[in-house]
Amino acid sequence: MRVSVFGLGYVGAVTAGCLAKRGHWVIGVDVNPRKVELLGRGEAPILEPSLGEMLREARAKGLLSATSSCAHAVAATDTVIICVGTPALESGDLDLSSVRQVLGDISTALRVQRRAQAVVLRSTVLPGSTARLVEEFLADLECNGLVKIFYHPEFTREGTAVADFEAPSLTVVGTRQGRPVPPDMIEELFGVGAAVVDWETAELVKHACNAFHATKVAFGNEMGRVAKQLKVDGQRVLNLLCQDTKLNISPYYLRPGNPFGGACLPKDVRALVHHGHQVGVDLPLLRGVVESNQRQLESVLTALDRLGQREAVILGLSFKQGTDDLRESAMVEVAHALLCRGDRVRLYDPAVNLEALIGSNQRTLEAKLPQIESLWCRDLPTAIGQQGVLVVAHKCVPLAELAKVVTPRHVILDVNGWPELKSLPARYEGLCW
């Protein structure tokens, strides 16, 4: 392929070098004449391990050149990759002025040559940005089939960027409405195994990854501060935490849906925040975790308001599937809130035996749902009834059983993430999807 790479900073220089190493013919483009000069000589404009050698080899093979002319680069290549920076504004938003400048120049060049091109945006942008930029600069060209637009976020780290490019931990390609990418382009440009999604998903996963990394750093530092204050080895604590690859360093818990509850997580996070305060260590991240969990509970109530239903059936009252533990269960709180505002509520959870509840579980119901006997349904048809919103908190009922009783008069609010519920005749609404 013949590729032009706009922006010769960390992402662009590494992209140019790695693509040239794969045998593609690459032109680097930048408004900074010093960067153009360096890359044109096969020298790295940034400090990145093994990049300089890679660029020298590409230059020696005639696979790498550089220019400050957008028109020349576009005319000489069939794929344009945009890697210019999107620095932060004082408001916290991203500055897309460089992206707009480059896209404006590229669109002008494309209109002159009238030849089909692929335009790949790698610059980090917020969700919805690609669609707006396309509308602003490339809509007519896309409509006429002269350009295909992709959003291809990068997940490289400075200091290991070349290794990350060559062996990516994640590869995502965004297209309009998630349309398929030509197989030859997937393999040659994006790599085998790339996940193809819509533009907005690709934009958001980039930010989600960075936010997750930042959260892990902040969490490790908070644990380190409180450990130091308690004269505990914080490194040892985090090393032990990372040894658990079943729950801690794993996909477990990393899914949107139910707020956390039960006997452990809520009280232990609050207790650690409180203990940190007692020993003089502020833990704002963990304090925010408690607040964020409350916001997720409120989002369930907001979703119910949006659905406009005043009759709700909660399927799954315990805090998670396969248990009868009602302590700090989000659905107990939801039921309590709905009753307080005068809604009609029915409850069903085959794992919960009201007569067998004792101790904290019993006290939870006495405090939050003293009228539980009048709300409780002992069989599914009675619970489902003829209408209302079905709040599915977890998979407490087989789908086949639900299919027998759910009707088009029902609405389903899926809090758990159970996509098969869409096959039922009721209107479906996902909490976070």
Image: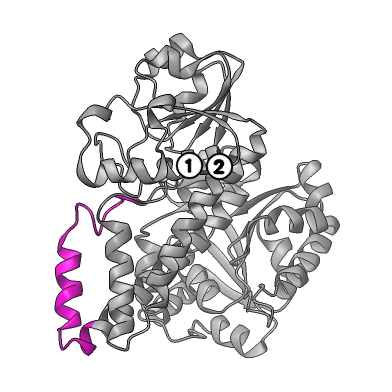
Check disc 2 and give the amino acid type.
Cys
Task: Please say if 338 is above or below 105.
Answer: above
Tell me the CA gap for discs 2 and 1. Answer: 6 Å
- Residue at 59%, 86% in the rendered image: 35
193 in the magenta segment: no
The residue lying furthest to the top in this view is 404
Q: Circles 2 and 1: CB distance less than 8 Å?
A: yes
**399 left or right of 271 in image:** right
Question: Nearest the camera: 361 or 64?
Answer: 361
Counting from the top left corner in percent of width and height, residue 430 is at 53, 36
Q: Quadrant of residue 373?
A: top left
- Residue at 19%, 66% in the rendered image: 241
Task: Please say if 262 is above or below 431.
Answer: below
Q: Residues within 10 Å of mark 1 (few under 14, many from 20)?
A: some
Task: Please say if 428 is above or below 251.
Answer: above
Identify the magenta region. Answer: 227-253
- Residue at 68%, 80% in the rendered image: 89
Check disc 1 and give the amino acid type.
His
Dot 2 corresponds to which residue?
340
**81 left or right of 371 in image:** right
Counting from the top left corner in percent of width and height, residue 210 is at 46, 67
Quarter of the image that includes the C terminus: top right
238 in the magenta segment: yes
Question: Nearest the camera: 318 or 59?
Answer: 318
Counting from the top left corner in percent of width and height, residue 136 is at 82, 58
Q: Secondary structure at mark 2?
A: helix
Question: Nearest the camera: 288 or 41?
Answer: 288
Q: Secondary structure at mark 1?
A: helix
Task: Please say if 80 is above or below 215.
Answer: above
Residue 220 in sight from this viewpoint: no
Dot 1 corresponds to which residue?
336
Residue 264 in sight from this viewpoint: yes
